[in-house]
Image (cartoon, grey):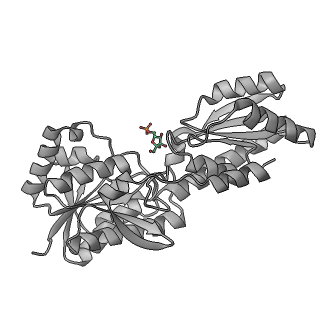
Amino acid sequence: MAIKKIAVLTSGGDAPGMNAAVRAVVRTALGKGVQVYGVYRGYNGLINGDMELLNLRSVSDIIHRGGTALYTARSPEFCTEEGMQKAIATCKEMGIEGLVVAGGDGSFRGAQDLTERGIPCIGLPCTIDNDIACCEQTIGYDTALNTCMGMIDKLRDTSQSHDRCSVVEVMGRHAGYLALNVGIAVGATSILVPEVPYDFDRDILQRMKKTSATGKKHFIIIVAEGVGHVVEFAERIQKETGVESRATILGHVQRGGDPTVRDRVLASRMGHCAVELLLAGKSNRVVTIQGNRVMDYDISEALRMKKPFDIDLFRIAHDISI
Ligand code: F6P
């Protein structure tokens, strides 16, 4: 029997482009005669029945906004069997026959659990970390890259004026994609990521000394969040090189801001695809993009995959930012 009612929620850390994805889901579904509930605050909204039916105008004026109009949360209660059963009971009560979950891999685990218990789910990869293995580019990543680049360009100005070293922490506890690509874009002298072990002397001090000898007087060192403390790094650099150093933690500003063209288009394509998958009777799929083609993967398979770190790009950064 054809699906008549679905729901959409955003879960986990927010990412610019989530709104564009929700808009695409709602407009695609309504266009096919399917009703859509917008569920608030991630899985918590399913547990508490905190949701409302959306219409075409409910998602007006959000395509250009960062954050998520549906709010988001990480839900410890949903990770318990009791919480999950409450969410399922809500779905049954509200007649929800399919769910689109916009989030990262933690959110997809929840989607997988729900699918196994009879609620068909489709995942939309939204995270600034770009750490979904089956997906070349996640929704939010491009915006975060540009946000970081803009902020570090500003740091470079003041770093250059003062002949200083700026040690900058970029988000990514377990993933260095943001750090690596931003590091290349801003011409960082060193880039430290969780995927590649580093040696403080070889990878920072010696590189600074080498470039100093050719006349360079200001430096940018990019450190992914998971690697270590930028304040300690800056103190040590100053002590051992004599170059005045400052630490900057970019923090959550990286997760905000208007989504770029790329993220808006990606989110729109993926959101559209998610509804088509549900209506085609598919479930437990994550929408991905590979070679500019929107595709879908089994969530369980996607969660087992490990994204290879781009070591060639890391080497390029090492070779040219000197
Ligand atoms: O997963 C996205 C992310 O922004 C990571 O880069 C970061 O480590 C984490 O979320 C921060 O989480 P929170 O918003 O809970 O501090």
Question: In the visual, does 187 lie left or right of 138?
Answer: right
What x and y, as percent, mark residue 141? 51, 55
> Can you see residue 37?
yes
Q: Nearer the viewer, residue 139 or 17?
A: 139
What x and y, as percent, mark residue 23? 35, 65
Q: Nearer the viewer, residue 74 or 316?
A: 316
Query: Which residue lies at the image location 8% right of the left edge and 56% below the top edge?
Result: 92
User: Which image quadrant for residue 99?
Assistant: bottom left
Question: In the visual, does 24 lie left or right of 313?
Answer: left
Q: How many marks?
A: 0
Question: In the visual, does 245 lie left or right of 107?
Answer: right
What x and y, as percent, mark residue 137? 49, 61
* Residue farthest to the bottom, as pictured: 32
Query: Which residue lies at the image location 23% right of the left edge and 43% below the top edge?
Result: 44
Query: Which residue lies at the image location 52% right of the left edge and 54% below the top edge?
Result: 308
- Quarter of the displayed picture in which ligand 1 can be seen: top left
What x and y, as percent, mark residue 218? 82, 39
> Can you see residue 11?
no
